[in-house]
Image: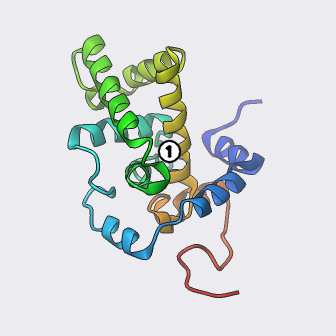
Amino acid sequence: MSMNRRQLCQHIVYVGLGSYLAVAAGACRRSDHDRDRDADSSRGGSGLLTPAEYATLAAACERLFPGDDDPGAIALGAPGYVERQLGSTAFSAWEPWFRSQLGALDADARGRYHRSFAELQPGEQDALLDAWIHGPRPRATFVSRLMHLTLEGVFGDPSYGGNKGGAAWALVGFAPSSPRPGDHHRM
């Protein structure tokens, strides 16, 4: 049986990703001050990454969750979410390594294709990410961690900066109940 993208997304969420992300988002709660400061960033992130690093990050996120008739990672705000998480205390240990891997991914693209990763065609980006997934462990680990954070940014609660307007939830037919993080209600 062949699944379309919407069915695949629903399947992913229904087999446990939604539950996992709810737990992960709760573990990475940030203060209202941090959320307000980050909301001011023009690209949706915290400004932690250089423009070149952010372009590589955004392009890679989009290849991991590409848009079609439905929004992809960029439209859902996942790259900004990932950048904010790298600047948070929960992921601060990842930041230097993650930035070096973004630079290495861009350098690999330049070495193979003579263009930055963000400038590559989608098929070229996919081929490079596939080579990284099946390559040396640091590269495979990077793509795995990037996938993890991208999916959090795509399907997490919009109050954490991704899943703009809850569009990914609508994609899989999820309707949140209140209270949610960021709702200032008490049970």
Q: Is 8 above or below relative to 113? A: below
Figure disc tally: 1
Picture quadrant of residue 157 = bottom right
Quadrant of the image for the N terminus? Answer: top right
State the residue in front, 71 or 161: 161
Judged left or right of residue 68, residue 54 is left
73 left or right, relative to 171: left
Q: Residue at x 33, y 58 (%)?
A: 44
Q: Determine whether 63 is above or below 129 in the image.
A: below
Position in image of residue 76 (x %, y %): 45, 54
Query: In the rendered view, does 21 fall on the left or right side of 64?
Result: right
| Residue at point 45%, 34% (across, down) | 63
Residue at 41% in and 49% down: 86
At x 77%, y 46%, the residue is 15
Q: Nearer the viewer, residue 77 or 5?
A: 77
Q: Which residue is mark 1?
A: 150
Q: Nearer the viewer, residue 64 or 96?
A: 96
Image coords of residue 64 (percent x, y): 49, 35
Q: Residues within 10 Å of mark 1 (few under 14, many from 20)?
A: many
Quadrant into which the C terminus falls: bottom right
Q: Furthest residue to the bottom? A: 186
Residue 110, image x and y in percent? 25, 18
Residue type of the residue flagged with mark 1 = Thr
Q: Secondary structure at mark 1?
A: helix
Horizontal side, residue 12 vs residue 112: left or right: right
As displayed, is residue 4 above or below residue 172?
Answer: above
Q: Position of residue 107 (x, y in %)?
A: 27, 21
Question: On screen, 130 above or below 95?
Answer: above
